Amino acid sequence: MVKLAEWMGKGIFRKHGIPTPVGVVVRSAEEAEAATRTGRVPLPCVVKAQVLAGGRGKGGAVQFANTPAEAALATRSILALEFKGEKVREVLLEQKVSILREFYLSFALDRSLRMPILMASAQGGVEVESVPEEAILRIPIHPFVGLAGYERRQVIRLFGLSGPAAKSLDDLLDRAWGVFQSEDAELVEINPLGLVGSGVIALDAKVVIEDDAAFRHPEYSEVRDDRTPLEEIAREKGIAFVQLDGNIGVIANGAGLTMATLDVLAEFGGRPGVFLDLGGTDDPGKVTEAFLLMAKAMPRAVFLNIFGGVTRCDTVATGLVEAMKQVPASERFPLVARIRGNNEAEGVAILKSAGVTSLSDLKESVQATVRAAEVPVEAPRGTVA
Ligand code: GDP
Ligand code: MN
C-alpha cells in the first residue's frame, strides 16, 4: 500500500485538473515565514501537518495563520508534534479559503463487490466513519463503463447543487475518477470537498496507490510508507519480514505454515512480535541474513518452525547455526526449533551439535516458546529448548 501525503495527492489532483488551494510544502518555520511574506502563499493561510493519519483538524495538526509570524509559529508548533505516533517532517501551507459547505467524496476499491465504488456524502469535513450509513451514497462503478453522467447527477442532486456549482462538481467527479483509474489507486478520498464561491475545490487529499501496480509508477518509489526500518531492509534483501506488536519471533517457511504458526502461538497465549517467511529457500546465506534481521527486532524468544518439503532441513539448520554464531551477545534470544520433513534427522543432528535441541511436537514446542518469552529479561537468556 503506497499512501501518499496530502501535498502529493494534491499534486496529482492538479495534474488532472482538479482545483486545490495555492500552497507550498515547508520543513522549517523560517521557510514558512518566507513563503507567506513573499506572497507565494497568500494570507490568511492554513498550516497542515503532512502525516498519513487522519483527524488532524481535531488534533491541532491543522492551524490557521494571518501573518508571516503566525505562519512561522504555527509551523514550529506543528513540526514539534508527534501526531498519532508519527513525527511531522513536512508542513503544507495553503491559502485559506472561505468554505460555504463541506462534502465527502471518495472512489475506493470495494473488495467484496470486486468493483470500484463511489462514496459521497453531503456531511463532509468529519471522519466518514462518524457519518450515518444512510447519509452516504454508494455507487458501484463498472470498471469498463466508467463513471456515467447519470451517476454524477446523483451526486450533484445529493449535494443539492445547481448552475455553475453543479457544473464544477460534474467536472471534478469526472477528473477524480480519472485519477483513480490512471494512477492505479485503491483510494482517492477528498474530505472535505469544499464549496467555495460557485465551485468545488479539494481541501484535503488522500490517495493510496495499489501495491501490485507500484511497478507501473516509479514516480512513487521514493514515497515513505508504513514499513518499519527493519521491514525496509528486509524488502531490499527480498525477505518476507513483518513486525507486529508482540514479543515472540516466528521463522517459518511458506505463507500457510507461517500464518498457522502465528495462530497456534496466539492460541497458547504467545504474542507474535515479528515473523519471517523463508519461503522456498534453504540457501544457508539467506537463512543467515534472515536470522540476523530477526535478532535486530529483539524478540524475547524465537520459534523456528520449518517444514522441509522443497527446503531441506539440514541446509536450513546449517544456515541457522552459522547465523547464531554471528548474533552479537546483546541480541541473543532463546530459540525453540521444530524442523520436520526432508533430511530431518540430519537437520536435528546439526542443531544438536550446536546446542539447540529441537522438539518435534508442535504443541510442546509452542508452549516451550511461550514459556521462554515469559522469562524476565534480567535472567540469562541462553539458547534453550
Ligand atoms: P483532517 O482532519 O486530517 O482530515 O484534515 P483536513 O485537511 O480535512 O482539514 C481539517 C479541517 O480544516 C477541514 O475539515 C476544514 O474544516 C478546515 N480547513 C482546511 N482547509 C481550510 C480552508 O482553506 N479554509 C477553512 N475555513 N477551513 C479549512
Ligand atoms: Mn480531511
Image (cartoon, grey):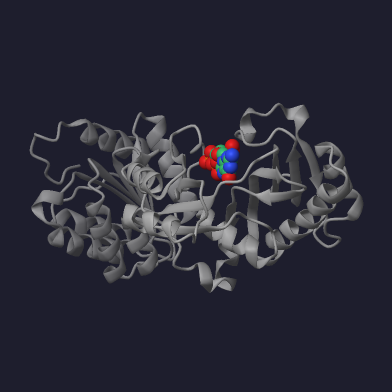
- Quarter holding residue 36: bottom left
Residue 306 appearing in the image: no
Q: Considering depth in this image, is 325 or 361 the residue closer to the camera?
A: 325
Report the residue that reaches farthest toward the right: 150
Q: Considering depth in this image, is 325 or 1 the residue closer to the camera?
A: 1
Percent across and percent down for residue 185 are 64, 58
Task: Identify the residue at horizontal 17%, vertical 53% (top origin).
Answer: 352
Q: Considering depth in this image, is 73 or 277 the residue closer to the camera?
A: 73
Percent across and percent down for residue 301 are 24, 42
- Quarter holding residue 244: top left
Percent across and percent down for residue 49 are 44, 47
| Lateral position of residue 339 relative to residue 257, left or right | left
Rendered-image quadrant of the C terminus: top left
| Lateral position of residue 105 relative to residue 37, left or right | right
Count of numbered circles on the image: 0
Residue 190 appearing in the image: yes
Task: Identify the residue at horizontal 43%, vertical 49% (top origin).
Answer: 258
| Lateral position of residue 7 relative to residue 277, left or right | right
Percent across and percent down for residue 33 are 37, 54
- Quarter holding residue 180: bottom right
Task: Identify the residue at horizontal 31%, vertical 68% (top origin).
Answer: 286
Task: Identify the residue at horizontal 52%, vertical 52% (top origin).
Answer: 94
